[in-house]
Image: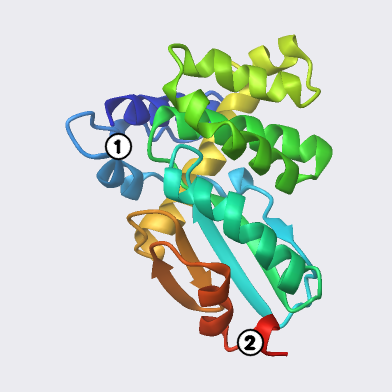
Amino acid sequence: MKYIVCCLVCCLSVWASEKQESNSRFVDESKSFSENLKNLQIPDEFNLEEIVIGDEKAPHTVIVYSSFSCNHCSKFHREEFPKLKRDYIDKGLVKVILRNYIDDLGALEAAILMRIFYAKSKDAVVLYKKIFDEQKDWMGSKNPREFLKQIFVKAGYDSKEVDSYLDTNNKEYRRVSAGLMKEQQRAMHMLRISSVPAFVLDDRVHQGILTCEEIVERLGIKSEKKQ
């Protein structure tokens, strides 16, 4: 994960340049991503807005950690999430919080673009669907970054604007990178999540694939099929 460690250095410069204490001294390319991440002091000002799907007052909360480059995450979002949304989220029984997990450069840059454009559209469900629907072709492309760019262009965003947000010198790229790293800290070092998909079901962490039915059962909600 050397390239991810390099991204840590990149995102750190956004606040170091503002005369805050530099974290760069903590980054050691000989150490793992997790070890480097644990030592970073990322200011709260870089906290990302939570992506909440459903009624804020729903009695149950499901936090979904997923990587845009993970095929199991893709399967969940394409096959299980629509059922969860139709039968439980839209009926006010469950709210879902979507969080990103970064395990490679593709996942990082897809998450950066999704977060930036989510701030404009507030439609995470559509953005997640577009990325996961084309995941196989995107990840298998000879030029994954260009393919990723085209996913957002086809979604209606300006080509030059998308390009600008893939520039590591862009302040938004660095700001969102910092926020994603802070979110990753919480996943790895507070919740002990080491693989995705992962779920926090109310207050219980589960790592591994779950179906809609299994999520509902673990939450103690009566299945739609039994009602």
Q: What's the amino acid at mark 1?
A: Phe
Residue 105, position in %: x, y? 42, 28
Residue 58, position in %: x, y? 75, 78
Front position among marks 1 and 2: 2
Please state, as top left, top right, bottom left or bottom right, where the C terminus lies in the image: bottom right
Whether residue 144 is situated above or below residue 123 in the rendered picture: above
Q: What's the amino acid at mark 2?
A: Ile
State which tag comes first along the sequence, 1 or 2: 1
Looking at the image, residue 194 sits to the left or right of residue 212; the answer is left
Label 1 packing within 10 angstroms: few (<14), some (14-19), many (20+): some
Please state, as top left, top right, bottom left or bottom right, where the N terminus lies in the image: top left
Q: Nearer the viewer, residue 9 or 88?
A: 88
Which disc is residue 15 wearing?
A: none
Q: Nearer the viewer, residue 127 or 141?
A: 141
Q: Residue at x 49, y 66 (%)?
A: 199
Label 2 packing within 10 angstroms: few (<14), some (14-19), many (20+): some
Residue 41, position in %: x, y? 43, 46
Residue 176, position in %: x, y? 59, 35
Q: Residue at x 43, y 72 (%)?
A: 205
Looking at the image, residue 106 sits to the left or right of residue 48; the answer is left
Q: Residue at x 38, y 62 (%)?
A: 208
Which disc is residue 221 wearing?
A: 2
Q: Nearer the viewer, residue 123 or 37?
A: 123
Q: Which residue is mark 1?
A: 26
Q: Is residue 67 visible?
A: yes
Q: For numbered disc 2, what is the local secondary structure?
A: loop
